[in-house]
Each structure stands twice: as structure tokens, then as C-alpha cells.
Amino acid sequence: MADWLDGLRRRAELRAKAGLARELRPRTADDPLTDLAGNDYLGLATHAEVVAAAADALHRYGLGATGSRLVRGSTDAHAALETDLADWLGADRALVFSSGYLANLGAVRALVRPRTLLVCDAHNHASLIDGGRLAGAQTEVVAHADPGAVDAVLADHPGRPAVVITESVFSVDGDLAPLAALHAVVRRHGALLLVDDAHALGVIGPAGAGGVAAAGLAGQPDVVVTATLSKALGGAGGVLAGPQPLIRHLVDTGRTFIFDTALAPAVAAGVHAALTLARDGARLRVELTDRVAAAVGRFTGAGLDVGGPPAGGVVSIGAPGPETALAWARDCRDRGVAVGCFRPPSTPDQRARLRITVNVGIPRADFDRALDVIVECAP
């Protein structure tokens, strides 16, 4: 009976030897580290107006939603958030899920029909990949950010229903997908385009409306947008925005929507307050852009391997290997700076790197000192 546990222990030992072991690190509310690892790009997670809105809803509704959206989990806080998300994203309707992961699973499944072909960027997030697997559709993985490769795959399957899936700002390297060119290919072949705008929402585009809006594609009938509410909006949950019939289909049939407890009303209210701040946050986005440029300049000036020009708040630095990346991140942490450490299988190209996420809520002097620490700890 214990053989299966022995097998798990052996696999854990092998991962540890390869530098691939993971560790949970609980933090306190007054954690002293300068946080360049989280995704709170605009510093809204602790903004006074966001916290006040969440606290008010907490007192009015209680801790949780107490049920799924179709039972008792839908509140006026959810409805108000969905209305403003749809308006911000330029979509007919928006539907809020309890996580961005579930929004992506539900989106992919909803768009799959008999014989649907999924064309997936090689650097896509795990939730998009898992969505394709759960949908059971044939998936073709294409070269990263390559509209020509997408065109070739679709041309090989004339007349077949197809969905092209991409992130807008990619989560690991922070580069921007060529959305306008991808959409031109999609439209020429009569396919659909599903864009995960998680790392672009609040960060780029008109009024921070994301990568789809920045590419001039908001509201297009062959474009579906998903995003998480846990990054620039500082909360939790996910959203899918698109044509009204798609939202109707998800409410009736979407398993990750129907059978999941709803997002807590307090979180929905806090995110709604963050949305208002992000929409009017041009000054925050200017500061974010300035800090990203400062980080890239500091790292490249020190000879570090920075990826392509970042489009949002992610700056990626290559590391020689998983163990080196782990030691680098640990040394930074020991000197008071938290950074992301991305190793296989979390990286699409099997290369290890540190991922730096810029947060404009951090005092500028602390941010600049953190950049120095990262350089000084480099292998």
C-alpha cells in the first residue's frame, strides 16, 4: 500500500536534485521584503479606496458568496462589476468567474464545436493549454508570436472551425503578441481569436483597457477576451468578455461557471473600486512604463540577459539553469527583495529565469535599491 508514496518521494528527490523543487513561503501582513514578484502592477491591492470598498461589502454580505452564481452566489456587487468590465473592455457582455484559470478553461470549452481546431501559441499560459486538453479538441502548437505559422496551420485545414489562442502580454517574458496581425489571419480564414489579456488589463491600451483594445480589436465579433482580476486590479477572480450569445451559452452550459462557488462579494466590490482607479490611472501607467525602462536599462547595463522589450510590467532575466536561478532568487530574498523564479515546467522554452514584476506602489527609492540588489546578486 505504501509503494505509491515511495514513488512520490523518489520523484520529489529527483526534482530536488534538478533544482525543480517548490516551496511555500507564507508571508505576514507586515512582510518587509520589497515585492518584485507579485502582480500588483498599479499598487491597488492595498489602496485605501479598494480596501474600504471590500470592507464595506464584507460587513454587508459576510465572508463568502455562499453558493454558485446560479444558486445564491450572484449579488449586485457581481452585476455592477460585470457591467463596468464589459464597458471598459468594449464588449457586449462580461461574465465573472472565481479565478482567471477557470475563466480560461470555460472559454476554451465554450468555443469548441465538433471538429474544432485549436491553434495555440507555444508560450501560452498553462490554463489555456489545459483548456484545450479538457475540451478534447485537436491542438496545433505554433511558434511563438508568429502570425505566419498560424496562417499556415489554418491554410492546411480549410473550412474547418478553428480558434486561435494567445496571450496579449505573455506572462513569462512580458512581450506583446502581434494581435492585429493575428486577427487579420483569423478573419481571413473565418476563425475565432481568444486572447488572454491578464497581464495587459489595466497596464496598456486606452484607459488601461488591455492589449485587445490597444490593437483596435475591442468589440470585434470574432474576438473573445479573458483576463484575471488578480493582477493590475489587485484582487482575485477572472472575467470573460464577448458577444451576448457566448455569455448566454456559458451561463447555461459552462461547467467552470455553473459548478463553482462564486467570487466573494467583498472581492468583487474591491475589484470594482480598483477598476475605477485603473481606468483613470494614466499617471500610474506612466510611472509603470518609466520603472520598466529603468529596470531594463539597469539590467542590460550590467550585462544581464534581458528578453525582448517588455510591453507591460514584466521584465524577464535569463539564468544559466534552474539551480542558479533558485540560488539567485534566494540571495535576493536574503537581502530583502522578493523576485519571481521561473523554472521548468513553468517556462515555455525550458529555460530558467528570474521574473521581475514592477509595482508602482513601492516607494521609488526602495524600487531602485531592489534593482541594485538583483544586479549585485547575479551569478
Image (cartoon, rainbow, N blue to C red):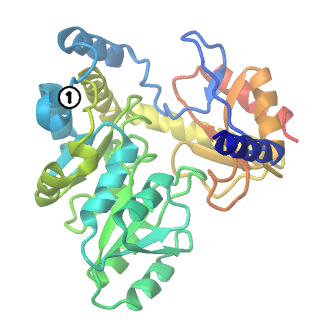
Measuring 20% from the left and 46% from the top, which residue is drawn there?
94
Residue 132, given in percent of the width and then of the height, sits at 40, 64
Which residue does the image show at 34% across and 63% down from the upper left?
A: 194
Q: Which amino acid does label 1 sit on?
A: Gly
* 267 or 262: nearer the viewer: 262
Q: Is residue 65 above or below residue 251?
A: above
In the structure shown, which secondary structural element does the residue marked by tag 1 occupy? loop
Q: Is residue 230 visible?
A: yes
**Which quadrant would residue 53 be assigned to in this image?**
top left
User: In the image, is 323 to the left or to the right of 83?
Assistant: right
The residue lying toward the viewer, choosing from 356 and 230, is 230
Q: In the image, is residue 254 above or below residue 162?
A: above
- Counting other residues with Cα less than 10 Å from the Cα at mark 1, is it few (<14), some (14-19), or many (20 or more)? some
At a point 24% along the width and 11% down the height, the residue shown is: 56
329 versus 215 height, above or below: above
Q: In this view, does 176 lie to the left or right of 198?
A: right
For the C terminus, the quadrant is top right
Is 57 displayed left or right of 128 in the figure?
A: left
Give the side of residue 361 with respect to residue 112, left or right.
right
Query: Is 38 in front, or is 306?
Result: 38
Question: Which x, y percent locates residue 244?
Answer: 11, 56
Q: Is residue 152 above or below residue 298?
A: below
**Who's the residue at 38% across and 28% down the image?**
235
Query: Which quarter of the image is occupied by the N terminus?
Result: top right
Number of callouts? 1
Q: Residue 110 placed where, x, y %?
A: 25, 61
Residue 88 visible somewhere in the drawing: no
User: Which residue in the structure is indicated by mark 1?
Assistant: 67
Find residue 163 and report its horizontal and vertical position in percent. Answer: 33, 72
